[in-house]
Amino acid sequence: MDTIKPDILVYRFPPPRQSVRSDRLSLFEPLELEYLYTALRKWRVTLIDGMADRRNIKRFIKRNSFNIIMLSGYLVHLDLLRELCAWIKVHCSPGTFVFLGGPQAEVTPSLLNFDHVDGVIVSSDTAIIRGIVSDIAAGRDFKTNRGLAYRDQDALVINSAPAFDPDSLPMPERVLFNAKPHRYFNMFFRPCASIKTSYGCQGLCTYCFCRKMNGGRFSCRSMSLVMDELQSINSKAVFILDDNFLSSLSRVREFISEIRERSIEKNFIIYGTSDFVVRHPQLMQELRNVGVRWILIGFEYLSSRRLKELGKRASSDDNIRALVVCRECDIEVTALFMIDPDWTHAEFDELETFVKKHRIFFATYSTKTVFPGADDAEGVYGCPVDSGIKWWRYDLLRVHERPVGMSLHMFYFRMFRLYLLPVFCSRNARSLFSYAGVLPALRLIFLSIITGIEFLVKLVRYP
């Protein structure tokens, strides 16, 4: 290969046109793009976050002369990824390199075994990407790098990733966030930055592939580096993106101690589990005292039996008690529920009653979806992916089996009702106004209704 001067485009896809826009209610900082920029800053790097920047990406690529293009997407973007990769090879210089990355690429790179792709990055370690670009710039064979999957004729060769030390990651410069911080927010927290303190997950949930990321390892950053990064973030609100921030008792205590010692004053949003919350109510109060304002908890089902089948450690009683503990600590909860295609009206009614009874006015309702890479998906998906699967349907809103207890449209209407419960239930609405204030609550209600209408329209138009 000839030597080149890298001119790099890094692009995160917007949601497919068939999906419901979630960016009206929250839009997270694209931390993976911020890390890539920092790791590759010795060369010319352009970041485009398609979630916040809806410019025509093909027109933008045509107007520039990028010789390395890196695309980041999720499972719902597979069709868009394949189409854009083919377009790039037709409309860009023959010497243009195309690389793909993202969570699905890391867990199941075979799903991205497309024509016109030079490599799939199978690790979050930015040193791997920097090494690949260095090899390309010097005219060396980049395919020897570990952590890279590449196509050899029709077969995919996977160079397994080395053990990843998250402390080796650079401090992200946050060029996107710092340029327009109010683009990135979560509900009432605007602006809201993002941070990761660990990679991988120690959970055993059968429906989730997160524990298989990072090569199946759970790796934590040193808390001193986490605190250094928090102090560098120009935002009062910070979303901690760890799959489960409450995975280690000692680590949570260390976090609390370091926040106090450095007098860091921020508002934190975290993911956690109800069994941890219930076992450590005093620690939850201490977390609230150092700034934890919001927690997202996977409630999934109302039945302890069903939760056990999913590999969850928490019981239904834990979920209920966690609500009580968090309210006593003044920590708001977003409950994440799962809905099965075999539900009848009785199951929907039971969930509606539960949500009203426990005054849950922040919740998500996802259809049961088997994702490639999860335990429940073993043997389900082959490769290469050319079977006509509509990957945009994997947005956690569409059913993948025909409902048996009602029509498809009625099923979606019952989901629509669940999402609008905070608006239709007067007691929940009063709690929302009390928590958020009049104007923010009205704004949220208005945006929820708009999103709900889009929800119905798109699920009917693109079932």
Image: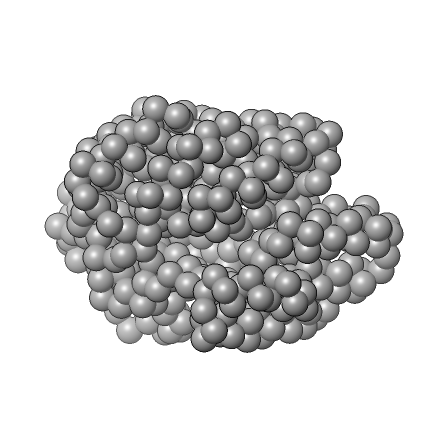
Q: In the shown orientation, is residue 195 left or right of residue 323?
A: left
Q: Name the colouring of the figure.
A: one colour
- Residue situated in front as seen by the camera: 162 or 383: 162
Q: In the shown orientation, is residue 156 left or right of residue 289?
A: right
- Residue situated in front as seen by the camera: 185 or 215: 185
- Residue situated in front as seen by the camera: 237 or 261: 261
Q: Say which residue appears at 35% left-offset and 64% top-offset.
A: 190
Judged from this view, the residue extending furthest toward the right is 405
Q: Is residue 424 above or below residue 81?
A: below
The quadrant in which residue 58 appears is bottom left
State whether residue 45 appears in this view. no
Judged from this view, the residue extending furthest toward the front is 328
Q: In the shown orientation, is residue 359 left or right of residue 351?
A: left
Q: Give the image location of residue 141, x and y in percent.
A: 25, 37
Q: In the shown orientation, is residue 56 left or right of residue 423?
A: left
Q: Give the image location of residue 420, x and y in percent.
A: 65, 65
Q: Give the image location of residue 140, x and y in percent.
A: 20, 38
Q: Is residue 94 above or below residue 62?
A: above
Quarter of the rendering occupied by the C terminus: bottom right
Q: Give the image location of residue 407, x and y in percent.
A: 85, 60
Q: Say which residue appears at 33% left-offset and 47% top-offset.
A: 291
Q: How many marks?
A: 0
State whether residue 35 appears in this view. yes
Q: Say which residue appears at 24% left-offset and 39% top-offset.
A: 259
The quadrant in which residue 380 appears is top right
Q: Say which residue appears at 51% left-offset and 67% top-offset.
A: 433
Judged from this view, the residue extending furthest toward the left is 42
Quarter of the rendering occupied by the N terminus: top left
